[in-house]
Image (cartoon, grey):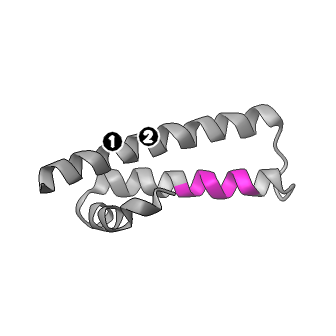
């Protein structure tokens, strides 16, 4: 996820509580989706799609924060 911004992610996880919370929530959803898709957790397709959409929203939010951070560092 956003591997090209590894340094920025590391810095933001240290300096921004909000970013860290969004990052952790995204990772938990990623894990939950994988568990559901592999049948380790019982979940219907609607619930899985809802989690995937929430993951995308969180990823977009993280990307926005990363780009703002990069701009401020320039």
Q: In the image, residue 68 lies at what x, y percent? A: 23, 45
**Residue occupying image coordinates x 85% and y 48%:** 42
Per the image, is 71 magenta?
no
- Residue 41 occupies quadrant: bottom right
Residue shown at 64%/40% (left/top)? 51
**Where residue 42 is drawn, which disc sits there?**
none
Q: CA distance from mark 2 to mark 1?
A: 6 Å
Dot 1: within a 10 Å radius of its alpha carbon, few (fewer than 14), some, or many (20 or more) residues? few
Judged by its main secondary structure, the magenta piece is: helix
Circle 1 SS class: helix
Circle 1 residue:
64
Instruction: Count residues near mark 2 (Cα–Cα under 10 Å), then give few for <14, some for 14-19, many for 20+.
Output: few
Helix, strand or loop at disc 2?
A: helix
Is label 2 in contact with label 1 (beta carbons under 8 Å)? Answer: yes
The spot of residue 54 in percent (x, y) is 56, 38
Tell me which residue sits at (18%, 48%) in the image. 71
Closer-to-camera residue (48/74): 74
User: Toward which corner of the image does residue 11 lie, by quadrant?
Assistant: bottom left
Q: Which mark is residue 60?
A: 2
Q: Position of residue 56 (x, y in %)?
A: 54, 40
Total residue callouts: 2
Q: Is residue 14 left or right of 29 when viewed as pictured? A: left
Residue 47 quadrant: top right
Nearer to us in this view, 74 or 42: 74
Which of the image's four quarters has the C terminus?
Answer: bottom left
Please report the residue visible at 33 percent of the width from the left and 63 percent of the height from the top: 13
Please provide percent x and percent y for residue 38.
84, 57
Span of residues in magenta: 27-34
């Amino acid at each position: 996820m956003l591997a090209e911004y590894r340094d920025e992610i590391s810095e933001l996880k240290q300096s921004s509580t909000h970013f860290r919370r969004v990052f952790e929530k995204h990772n938990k959803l990623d894990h939950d989706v994988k568990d559901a898709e592999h049948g380790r957790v019982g979940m219907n397709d609607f619930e899985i799609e809802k989690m995937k959409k929430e993951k995308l929203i969180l990823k977009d939010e993280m990307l926005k924060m990363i780009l703002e951070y990069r701009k401020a560092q320039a």
